[in-house]
Amino acid sequence: MKKILSLALVLVLSLTMVVGCGKKEVAYTVEDGVLTMATNAYFPPYEYYDGTEIVGIDIEIAQAVADKLGLELKIEDMEFDSIIIAVQRGKADVGLAGMTVTEDRLKSVSFSESYATGIQVVIVKEGSGIESLEDLEGKKIGVQLATTGDIYATDEFGSDYVHQYNKGNDAVLALVQGKVDAVIIDNEPAKNFVTANEGLTILPTEYAVEDYAAAINKDNTELLEKFNEALKALIEDGTVQKIIDKYIPAE
């Protein structure tokens, strides 16, 4: 009888250890079993609304990473300048929003391996007389708040000439309405905005080239390691490139 009880106790302890290990495996996320992604869903084709659903490159990459980690993906849409704060305060696990690695941001969060390259460009009205980057001097420039376009333009042209908007499309609307003379924003969203708004064009000269990565809480080294492992595997097997090609066909 004692042997039977001992065996039963061992089985119970073993089951407890298995369940405990299972919980430990997902304890590195804000919500057990869930990868919470903070984004700003007004940045096509990286993240945008298709009806009521948020879709795009970053969404599919995050979903692929979550699948590899055995986690459910949960998306939280917020203002761009709230994303790093949400990651810092443990409200979200990762921030993906066409976000560039910068020295200033590295003071607040860690970043994953880069998964895409972004190019900053300038949108102007056709016939505006602005034909080069040099022509931007003294002009009113629209940017999305807290983006690298905002940072670069403020450093180069001065805050008096930079007009900040919560969303990229708000900056473009200001350009259409004549409230600003140009908008600095990433190339892929820029192409979408120009297509949707007649009379706008993109200057042929690139403003800046940068790498996109996922923002992760500095203290969450376990998530950073696991996220990077999954991301690297998805880059190596071609999944990431297939997702990018789906939204940005080769010209």
Image: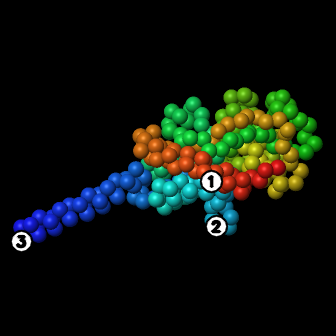
Between disc 2 and disc 3, whose residue precedes?
3
Looking at the image, is mark 1 or mark 3 earlier in the sequence? Answer: 3
In the image, what residue type sits under mark 1? Thr
Q: Tag 2's secondary structure?
A: loop
Identity of the residue drawn at 63% across and 61% down? 54
Q: How was this image coloured?
A: rainbow
Q: Which residue corresponds to mark 2?
A: 52
Circle 3: residue type: Met
User: Residue 119's x, y, as percent?
Assistant: 73, 40
* Label 2, label 3: how far apart the Cα atoms are: 62 Å
- Would you say 99 lies left or right of 27 here? right
Question: What is the distance, in whole Å, between disc 1 and disc 2 at their CAs?
Answer: 25 Å
Q: Is residue 237 left or right of residue 108?
A: right
Q: Is there CB contact under 8 Å for labels 2 and 3?
A: no
Residue denoted by label 3: 1
The residue at 11%/64% (across/down) is 6
Q: Is residue 129 visible?
A: yes
Indicate which disc, 1 or 2, sits on the residue closer to the N terminus: 2
Question: SS at mark 3?
Answer: loop
Which mark is nearer the camera, 2 or 3? Answer: 3
Looking at the image, which is closer to me, 148 or 61?
61
List the single residue furthest toward the bottom. Answer: 1
Percent across and percent down for residue 104 are 56, 32
Q: Residue at x 70, y 42 (%)?
A: 118
The disc labelled 2 sits on which kind of residue? Thr
Q: How many marks?
A: 3
